[in-house]
Amino acid sequence: MTEYGEELLRQRVWYWLEAEKGMEVDAEVEIGTGRIDLVSKSSEEVWGIEVKVGNYGTEQVDRYVESGALDRLYVASGEELNPVDNSIDVRTLSQTRSRLRAGMAENWYTKEEIKKELSGALSNEQRNRKVGSSTVYGYVLPAKNIESNKTPISLDDGIRRIQNAITFSEIGIIHVPSTPVLDAMSPGEAPDPEIVQEASELTRTKTPNTNCSEEPWVRHQLWEKYGGIPEGHIPNTLESDQPYRPIDLISFKGSSDPTDAVKNPADNKVLGFEVKGESSFSKNRLCKQLTQFMETSTLSQLYLCVPTSLKNEAIDFISSQPIFDKVGIVTVAADGSVTIIKPAETVIPEYDGYLERQKDRKTGYGEEFPADIDQTVTSPYITDEEAVRLKYIDPKPLAAELLTDESVPPNNSEYLTPEFTASNRTSLDDLIDEDASATRVYVLEGEVFNKRDRKRGLVELGISYYNGRDILLLNFTRYEGGYIWFTGKELDFLQMVLHSIESIGCGEAPGQGYFYKIKDRWERAHKDRDEKVENTPDKAYYSDTSDYENQIELKIQSHVSDLAAVVDKDSVVNLRLGGDEEGADLEVSKAQLVDLIASIEILRKNSGKTAELPKRETDSWSQARIARSGELVEDVNGIDYRSDVIR
């Protein structure tokens, strides 16, 4: 869908409930079992509405059913939720099963009683719907001998939760039609929401309180008057790895493109509104927020917005702070009327956006660029954290400097071997008590093999660096091949070989590691484990003894005469782990070699900081894979290679 957040959906549903249904509405209302997104009241009924961009879980809405504060409950979503074909809420089924187990343990009911109630409550079709390899009936029916630490649930409640997880019978569904973002930002311009499934009538025993002097209500009145982006994104000036922070409302005068406010400020403006209610008007916090908003230089005007009851407090606060002379004041009365008490002074914004992990973001819109808005950010705000990422965005200059290193001993120019002898040490599992501070994965072509099997295809070479121990781990695939790790002078020597590969034919870097066995693969594939398999292998799982690691070597061999002249995509180096009977033999492109050389240098020199690694980051950075071209890819199988990946 084109909308970029639940907050805008909430504003649209709120406006529709007021304008079309004639209901009194408030947001973030406490109803006894949690805060619900919207509560709307008519003279006859009280509705609760939970707003979702996509699908929803029934456990959360089921708590609202139990509140006793609603006559009807709806879920409003930008997705076209089909109440019949919707996916089963497996999480709710699982939790309900555990709570039924707890009830059985307390002798509240028996397994036979659960069977009887399930058979009466669910149709044959519903009981036989698939949940993985089981049916709904088989999945939720608890075994007597399985203990549960969950809170027991009554049989009636358990059956009702199971029904809701399958049929959503009590919950109404409101569809919020997708529409161009610029239309959705203007109240009344977007298509009206539509009730596609009526909610069942609930039993209400109390009426929730609404309040027109708190932030949600004040913000909605501002949005109705000015339109725009609620919870709009602007740069984050704080020391934080999050490059943006939200402001309550960003609206536009003239063009809806913030770039136009930078280029043509006479005709276009970006307005920022920070909202405070009676329970959130903290002078210390407000001072910090307004200061930070002004520091971004992305707004043409900045307003402090409060309910009329806080008018004097707002005036006193702004007038007592000379740095806020340019900040305006807006009040919202109990009838929803908006009044400008003090106009904001107009300034010319310097920036029309910011960088988020080296990707352009527009002021207000964040990562969601409307089709009507120019995608180009002409003047991005650079946070301190983003400046760090930009330092090594291209690995080539750093690698070129290292590749000219004069560190090769003169008598060893063809075949570089260490002048020291590596000694046995404790296994990596016993040595490391921290997670790797950085991980990169290189997608290499080649072979992995053992005494019985040899496979050719794509192999994932993962590197992990443990800054506290100065250890570099190279992991060749997850189930086949092997791994090797280096520390201290071994790691120094590995870098020497890599840096000197233009002037030598080959080098052997000693380390310690392990070759995966065939039985390891079978056991790993068939063992029932809940935890996720990480890039760093659980090495102790692969062996029957505690001293399974051995001294092994990584052979690095150049197979081109002029490395500097080779283009990025060509294979220039082979990495050989092990001998003829077990290990891996992989081809490395020039781009991958350059990235590897730069990455190891950066990790060791900069305390393993992930942000300083070259190239652009991705949303799942620890899983980012570097293809032969040097580009990052999310999915190995999406690369046009000759073979499938070996995992």
Image: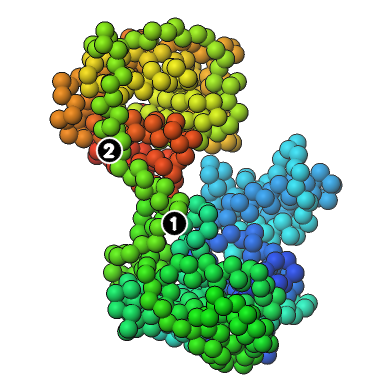
Image position of 594 with respect to 114: above or below: above
Location of residue 481 in the rendering, given as x and y in whole percent from the top left corner? 40, 20
User: Alpha carbon of mark 1 to alpha carbon of mark 2: how far?
Assistant: 23 Å
Location of residue 516 in the rendering, given as x and y in whole percent from the top left corner? 45, 18
Q: Earlier in the sequence, mark 1 or mark 2?
A: 1
Query: Picture quarter containing residue 439?
Result: top left
Residue 397: image tag: 2
Which class describes the residues within 10 Å of circle 2: few (<14), some (14-19), or many (20+)?
few
Location of residue 335 in the rendering, given as x and y in whole percent from the top left corner? 62, 93
Residue visible at 57% across and 78% down? 322
Q: Hey, which residue is sitting farthest front in the picture?
A: 322
Please state if 628 lies on the left or on the right of 228 as rendered. Answer: left
Observer-nearest residue: 111 or 68?
68
Which residue corresponds to mark 1? 383
Residue visible at 70% across and 58% down? 159
| Residue type at numbered disc 2 | Pro
Q: Quadrant of the C terminus?
A: top left
Query: Picture quarter containing residue 579?
Result: top left
* Number of marks in the rendered image: 2
Please state if 97 lies on the left or on the right of 466 as rendered. Answer: right
Residue visible at 66% across and 73% down? 283
Location of residue 383 in the rendering, given as x and y in whole percent from the top left corner? 44, 56
Camera sees residue 560: yes
Observer-nearest residue: 149 or 304?
304
Camera sees residue 5: no
Q: Quadrant of the N terminus?
A: bottom left
**Are dots 1 and 2 in contact, CB under 8 Å?**
no
Image position of 267 with respect to 203: above or below: below
| Residue type at numbered disc 1 | Thr
